[in-house]
Amino acid sequence: MRVARRAGAWLLYLLGAAWLARWFQRRRLVVVCYHGVTQQPDGVPGDDAGLHVRAERFRRQLRFLRSRYNVISLDQYRQAIRGADVSLPPNPLLITFDDGKRNCLTAALPLLEAEGLAAAFFVITGFMDEAGDERPEWTASDDSSYLSWADAAKMASKPGYEIGSHTSSHQWLPSCSEDSLPAEIEGAAHEIRSRLGTVDPALAYPWGARDDRVLSVAGKTHDLAFTIDGGSNLLGSNPLEQTRVNVGDMDSTATLALRLAGITGARPPSRPPSESKSTTAAKV
């Protein structure tokens, strides 16, 4: 079945379906959602969903994105939706990462810089230490450990790279109590502001989960927030429900192209998997 799906994807891709769909949607912003990049040649053990993309595949994906889209920074998009004198290029695309694993610094960032592409990184503030491993080179432990605040400050100091919030402890937000929900959303935002000097950190909902109550709390501290519903965004769409497209290690050029063009896609799980802070690959 998987072979047949891949063959079908390549057929649609070679017939130009992705090109045609991308042309019709050239005024819409596509946001991609990654979760990590690993230098382990066989991928991260236990990462059955392929959330951590192998480095060479990630390099190829970045080059594909750069050849088909105009990659912008989160700040460029923020200025555009605020009505500032900033216009988006055709086929704009924003690269984001969820969870804040340390391989974002040691494996993903060097490849992004080599290709000259901006990105935003959404961190889980409660999982971050003051100062962690200071080694600049990737090690296998980076695939399971989290960025420290020192790491995040280093990344945020680079032009085009921004740190946003993935909440305080990565809870299913609609199930949070009246007391814990503000701590998850507002508490994380305040900590990012105070530690990194970020004026307007964006938010990525864990698993994309939100309801009217979550949106109300998010709107008090964020003017831009992202789901993982798939699809693309028009200027003027709800800034607290900006859609993103999940990308992973299992994506070929064809499946990547078709998903970004909105021809195919997979929705996130309806409920979070059973997990703990030490789980390497379950977070979304």
Image (cartoon, helix red, strand yellow):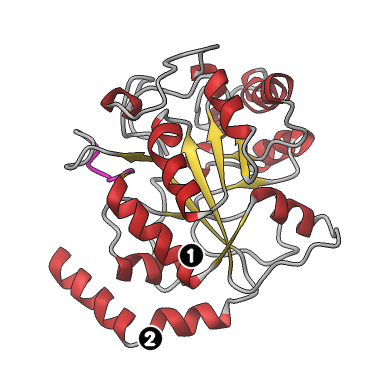
Magenta segment main secondary structure: loop
Few, some or many residues within 10 Å of mark 1 (<14, 14–19, 20+)? some
Quadrant of res 85? bottom right
Residue stretch in magenta: 47-52
| Residue 61 sits inside the magenta stretch | no
Regarding mark 1 in the picture, which secondary structure is present there?
helix
Q: Quadrant of residue 165?
A: top right
168 with respect to 248 (left or right) = right
Estimate the x, y position of residue 40 in percent, counting from the top left: 22, 37
Q: Amino acid at mark 1?
A: Arg
Q: Is residue 147 left or right of residue 216?
A: left
From the image, state whether disc 2 or disc 1 is nearer to you.
Answer: 1
Q: Which residue is mark 1?
A: 66
- Tell me if 187 is positioned left or right of 42 in this view: right
Residue carrying label 2: 16
Q: In this orientation, which residue lies closer to the viewer: 76 or 175?
A: 76
> Where residue 150 appears, x then y in whole percent?
56, 19
Mark 2 vs mark 1, CA separation in Å: 18 Å
Q: Secondary structure at mark 2?
A: loop
Residue type at the position of mark 2? Gly
Residue at point 67%, 17% (across, down):
179
